[in-house]
Image (tube, grey):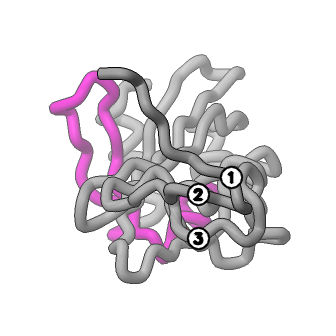
Amino acid sequence: MTSEEIQRRLQERCGDAVGALHTETLDPWIEVDPERIEAVARSCKEDEALRFDFLSCLCGVDAHDSIFVVYHLYSYPLRHSAVLKVKVHKGKPVTHTVTTVWRGANWFERETYDLFGVRFEGHPDLRRILLPDDWEGYPLRKEYVFPTEYGGIDNTRDYGF
């Protein structure tokens, strides 16, 4: 199935929760409403014409004023793939969990929360996964300033340049 066919099928099933298909990048992607990502994900998995049984990756991308949450899907039975993206504003980076659709999303969502600060409503255990609980900020945001010390340990580096 082509990206155009996948996007058209999702729009038929999910209506305006599914936005435009963006083909200007190497991997074409479909925009999805962050409030309805869980329903769209369920359609991706349960629709016999799509059967996306595998969430191969979920990650965040900082786009200056907003963050994209990117979902890479694959169908082993039908051997096709798709990329979905939801856009959340940095001031309120919230979307819904897809752990109810793909259990493997659990740690992907925790990592995206830990490094970008995106909250996944309905997540069964949303807490830091890579950084200590008392870490302040989200290191993969463009505006993040790395602390000069943590826990009494100096983090500054002299590279001799």
Dividing the picture into quadrants, the one containing residue 126 is bottom right
**Position in image of residue 30 (x %, y %):** 34, 47
**Position in image of residue 109 (x %, y %):** 66, 56
Picture residue at 60% right of the left edge, 50% below the top? 154
For the N terminus, which image quadrant? top left
The kind of residue tagged 3 is Glu
* Element type where label 1 sits in the image: strand
For discs 3 and 2, the disc positioned in front in the rendered view: 2
Q: Of residues 73 and 130, which is closer to you in this image? A: 130
Tell me the magenta residue range. 15-42
Dividing the picture into quadrants, the one containing residue 28 is top left
Residue contact at pointers 1 and 2, CB within 8 angstroms? yes
Is residue 22 something one can see in this rendering? yes
Q: Which mark is residue 153?
A: 1
* Element type where label 3 sits in the image: loop
Residue hosting label 2: 149
Q: For this view, does 22 lie left or right of residue 86?
A: left
Picture residue at 35% right of the left edge, 32% below the top? 3
Q: Of residues 67 and 9, which is closer to you in this image? A: 67
| Residue 24 magenta | yes
